[in-house]
Structure formats: C-alpha cells, structure tokens
Amino acid sequence: MATYTVTKVRKERSADGSHRHIEGVITDSGVHYTRAEVVNSINAGHVWRTSNLGRTATIVPMSYCPSSTCLAKPYIRTNADGTTSDNLENLPEG
C-alpha cells in the first residue's frame, strides 16, 4: 500500500457561509486530492500523513465536518498527537 504525505490544504467556504473548511489536500509531489479521494484511499488501505515543521500526523476519516452546523461529508482530520503544527487545519494553503 502507498503512503501519501500532505503538506498543504485547500479550503472553501461552507454552504451556509459560517466558516471555511478543508476542500482537499496537496501532497509533497504537488498533486491535489479531494476529501472524498483521501477517504476512499484510506478505506482501501493506503496511509495519509501530514508533514509540517518536522512533525507528522496520521490523517483519518470523519463522517462530517466538525462544525456543528455543517453537513459537508466525508471529512478528514489528523489524530491528536500533542502538537498543533501538523494538524490539517494548520497546514499552509495551496
């Protein structure tokens, strides 16, 4: 199985306009993948990780955006690891 390293994210305005959330990710090779493509790849057994400032975190799927009023799905997040620098929300936008 493949391992993908995410170094940037793309964000979009939520349907209700209340916040910006992750639309997709960009890997270290410069390829853009949507949230759904990442989730499908994870479900197929591939590994997705973030990389930022020397830190890494594993990306995992979620059913919906974590904002309580948002129904965007599927969604992705990083596993909690004691630092915020490798969180998807904190990666640079690309």
Image (cartoon, rainbow, N blue to C red):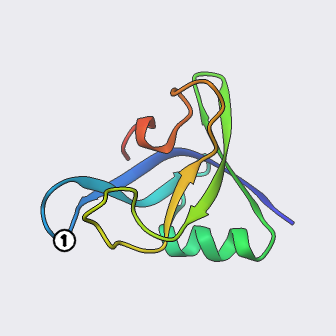
Q: Which corner quadrant of the image does residue 47 belong to?
A: bottom right
Q: Residue at x 64, y 57 (%)?
A: 60
**Residue at disc 1, secondary structure:** loop
For the image, the number of numbered tags is 1
For residue 54, above or below residue 13: above
Viewer-side residue, 58 vs 70: 70
Q: Which residue is mark 1?
A: 15
Residue 10, image quadrant: bottom left
Can residue 30 be seen? Answer: no
Judge whether 85 appears above or below 23 on screen.
Answer: above
Q: What residue lies at 77% left-to-right and 77% top-to-bottom?
A: 44
> Residue 28 at what x, y percent from top left?
60, 46
Q: Is residue 25 left or right of residue 61?
A: left
Q: Position of residue 87 (x, y in %)?
A: 52, 38
Q: Give the percent coordinates (x, y) of residue 11.
A: 32, 55
> Left or right: 31 with respect to 72?
right
Q: Residues within 10 Å of mark 1 (few under 14, many from 20)?
A: few
**Residue 1 % position (x, y):** 87, 66
Residue 87 in view: yes
Outermost residue, front side? 68
Kind of residue sitting beneath label 1: Ala
Seen in the image, is 30 located left or right of residue 42? left
On screen, residue 63 above or below 28: below
Q: Residue at x 26, y 60 (%)?
A: 12
